[in-house]
Amino acid sequence: MKRFIIAVIACTCLAQTAAPPILVVRAARMITATSDAIATPGLVTIRGDRIAAVGGAVPAGARVIDLGDATILPGLVDLHTHLTSTGVHWEDELLKTTPGEAALHGAHNALVTLMAGFTSCRDMGPTWPYTDIDLRKAIDAGVVPGPRLMAAGNYVSPTGGAGDARQFSIFVDVPIVRNLADGPDEIRKAVRTNLKQGADFIKILGTGAVLSKGAPPGSQQYTEQEMHVAVEEAARWGRHVAAHLHGNEGIKAGIRAGVRTVDHGSMMDDEAVELLRTHHAYFVPTLYTSESISGDPTVPDSEKARSKEIAQIKDKSFQLVLKAGLPIGFATDAAVVPHGQNAREFGYRVRLGQSPMAAILSATKTAAEIMGWSDRIGTLEAGKFADLIAVPGDPLRDITALERVVFVMKGGMVYKSAEYADRRNQR
């Protein structure tokens, strides 16, 4: 019996130290996102959860997944999602749902998003505070499948601002929601609270919003000083600030205050664009929301009117930044855009003049840089996580191919593939 136990222990140790099997994903072409070039053919060698090599020959003994006439790309990144949202109206969510319900919806939406080819997301704050952090933990623990998440935890909003969730009678209160902060001291405390609870970054709402009954989108809500306090405090924790900013003056105040990303950025002028350049801030527009809101029967007419009023303005702002040659991040504002339809943003941007390759780079290399994750995702390079997808044909000829993802791998695990779906747990 003693010899048997020793033999079992020895076998277990050998199994733990044995090199993981080699897997090769092959296709007609490949976009590595390390340059503007497209490679033919495409070949990525994976060992464990990492990329071992890009290009070259198939190693001896490797298992090969041949995707045929497809294009391999890095896993896509969406910089502005709301995965735990069950709808677009705070009144309904706060009065008719629970945090547990939001978390369960989040698990579903995370899977839908992953299967659409988005292997990483920056989640911009839930209606029920910190449910996005719980979702991130569940994904990291392998409890539920979903993208790698960077979570905000909770909004930081001024009273009456875009993130003021109490959009109902003043006599109705939702005690669990504590996201309002006015003035430097309250903002500093809100930032510290979010980071204490596990937030990866801070989201502040510096202007009004489209899907809100409060101040109009162009209205500046936080002062430059207030936004700077959020930036200063987040920096002490080694974190960045993403700012919801629609109006031009609010955008400029946020950039001067030191925010890392201008999210939405709907009303830009030449001065705002130059500030982006000189302050090294990133522009993260959400463009397809205009079409999505116009066709959503659940959105009130008043809010559809707000969206319609700024639709052409935000398109022109995007073209202004595009012309300036500045980096642009990829974002969708899902759930405003239904989860899983994130890739429709690509076609909208290309129609406005962005090249297909630039659009792809915005959702891969540039997005990873914005998140501070360039060392692990965003390009197909040896040593990075084996997060890769494939689409039929050539997306540089038809950008809508990104809406038809046929293969998804995250961390070396196959999550979507018609041929290999039943083998995802073999490795």
Image (cartoon, helix red, strand yellow):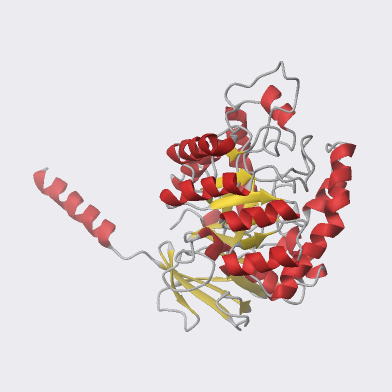
Of the 4 image quadrants, the one containing the N terminus is top left
Q: Is residue 147 visible?
A: no
Could you tell whether 219 is left or right of 300 in the image?
A: left
Could you tell whether 350 is left or right of 159 in the image?
A: right
Of the 4 image quadrants, the one containing the C terminus is bottom left
Specify the farthest residue to the top: 171
Q: Position of residue 221 (x, y in %)?
A: 69, 42
Q: Is residue 383 visible?
A: yes
- Asked if residue 245 is positioned above or below residue 368 in the image, the reply reads above
Q: Position of residue 270 (x, y in %)?
A: 75, 67
Residue drawn at x 60%, y 41% as measured from the top left: 125
Specify the farthest residue to the left: 2
Could you tell whether 99 is left or right of 294 in the image?
A: left
Residue drawn at x 75%, y 24% as measured from the top left: 168
Q: Position of residue 274 (x, y in %)?
A: 67, 68
- Asked if residue 123 is positioned above or below residue 313 in the image, the reply reads above
Count of residue discs: 0
Could you tell whether 279 is left or right of 303 in the image?
A: left
Q: Quadrant of residue 32?
A: bottom right
Q: Quadrant of residue 327?
A: bottom right
Q: Position of residue 413 (x, y in %)?
A: 49, 58
Question: Which of the two residues, 67 or 375, is positioned nearer the viewer here?
Answer: 375
